[in-house]
Amino acid sequence: MKETLTKYIFIDESGDPTFYGSGKRLLVGTEGFQPYSIIGMVETNNRKALRKKVVEFMDSVKSDVLYNTIPSINTKKAWYVHARADHPEIRIKFIELLRQLPDYKVHVVVAKKILSIFNRKHNNNPTEFYFDVLHHLLANQMTDANVHYKLYLSQRGNNSMNKFSEAVKKALKSDAIQSGNEQEIKYSLEIVSSEEMPELSVVDYLMWAVQRKLLKGEARYFEALKKKYGVILELYEE
């Protein structure tokens, strides 16, 4: 019998799945509307090493007088590496680290937010939209019966264990139909906060690089990290 290996998967999001604001006010086309919902995952067999490198990076920043007075770091709240909020100098330092780190791969799904599809396919429900995108992200990623998959979903908005479990089961069912091979896949699920899981900073940054290219046309971060991406899937083109 083959030894069961463990693969760790950390899932996060960028943008948001919302189309309407308070009072059912349509946000499409208004200032600040996010035209894409992006969900990504970092997979690794060597979680301990990945976590250690991110924690060491944060500790080095917090102990360095060149950086530890930056307001986003010098705060009463617990600081963790987060691309959108980080100072540009911290971003560059962390991207340099991500370019060098081995033993991880990031997969990303970019869902264009199209109102007609949202109304028709997702019943005007941002939670349904989010977990449909998540299902596409997980497709073909959990196929080895000799691996125990440990999935960690970042705690955001209306994320729930029931919806998380449904998305995973849907992905596994699709994989089984596609391959014609129904086998028992071993996995466990947990919803966690970014403060608790430094590994989420890795996928956060690689999603940010994709988003930066899409929204700002600035591709240098994406190009610098290109070798670290696995699957990049675009959804919902009309």
Image: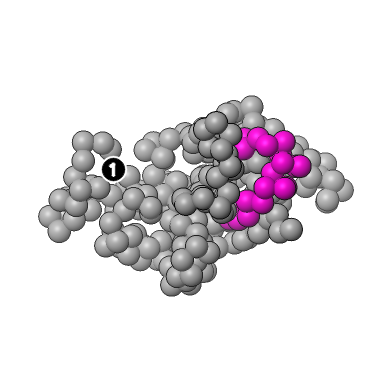
Horizontal side of residue 9 vs 174, given as left or right? left
Percent from the top left, x then y, of residue 83? 38, 54
Viewer can see residue 120:
yes
Tell me the element at label 1: loop
- Residue drawn at point x = 50 percent, y = 56 percent: 207
The image shows residue 189, relative to residue 223, as above or below, that is above
Rendered image quadrant of residue 193: top left
Q: Looking at the image, what colour scheme do you see? A: one colour
Q: State the residue lying farthest toward the right.
A: 180
Quadrant the C terminus occupies: bottom right
Percent from the top left, x then y, of residue 133? 65, 46
Rendered image quadrant of residue 162: top right
Q: Which residues are magenta?
A: 108-128
Percent from the top left, x then y, of residue 81? 34, 49
- Report which residue position mark 1 lands on: 79
- Residue drawn at point x = 84 percent, y = 46 percent: 177
Circle 1 Cα neighbour tier, 10 Å, few/some/many (<14 / 14–19 / ≥20): some
- Residue drawn at point x = 53 percent, y = 64 percent: 214
